[in-house]
Amino acid sequence: MKFILLLVPFLLVCCTGNDSSTSSSLGVEFSLRPGQQTSINGEDLTIKFKSVSNDSRCPIDAQCIWAGNAESNVDLTKTGNPSSTIQLNTAGSTDLPNEANFLNYTIRITELQPYPKVDSTIAQADYKARFIVSKQ
């Protein structure tokens, strides 16, 4: 009985899952928080959401002339190839694209939450982005 009581805490410490890494599939949206990464099933491709480096989106409780933009930094790695850091923008314009190509893949940001509020700062840990990866 003592053995079991000693074993339970060990298992809880050693065997709990790490939610910073997940797996996803091509063509299926997935969500990541800064610092989290996902591997694309069957592709040896890893996407890591590093940070939001700039968030100038119009706050939800304000009226703006322009919707603004948020820039997200993403690391892309495929086994046997050099990794790449890309910037994806919520604006999705020619100058501020919401998608980028890496090798024969296209990654696109489809959403970034939460939306800014007037007189409020969003902590990096509070962001959550949705992405989709497709093969060219």
Image (cartoon, helix red, strand yellow):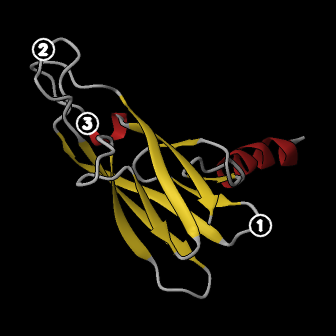
- Distance between the alpha carbons at the discs numbered 2 and 1: 45 Å
Q: Nearer the viewer, mark 2 or mark 3?
A: 2
**Residue placed furthest toward the top:** 61
Q: Residue at x 47, y 67 (%)?
A: 101
Label number found at residue 42:
1
Residue 56 vs 104, above or below: the answer is: above
For residue 99, side relative to residue 38 (left or right)? left
Residue type pointed to by label 3: Ala
For the C terminus, the image quarter is: bottom right
Query: Is disc 2 surrounded by few (<14), some (14 to 19) or many (20+) residues within 10 Å?
Result: few
Q: Residue at x 35, y 33 (%)?
A: 126
Query: Is disc 3 surrounded by few (<14), some (14 to 19) or many (20+) residues within 10 Å?
Result: few
Frontmost residue, 108 versus 119 = 108
For residue 114, side relative to residue 42 (left or right)? left
Circle 1 — which element?
Answer: loop
Q: Which residue does the numbered mark 2 point to in the structure image? A: 63
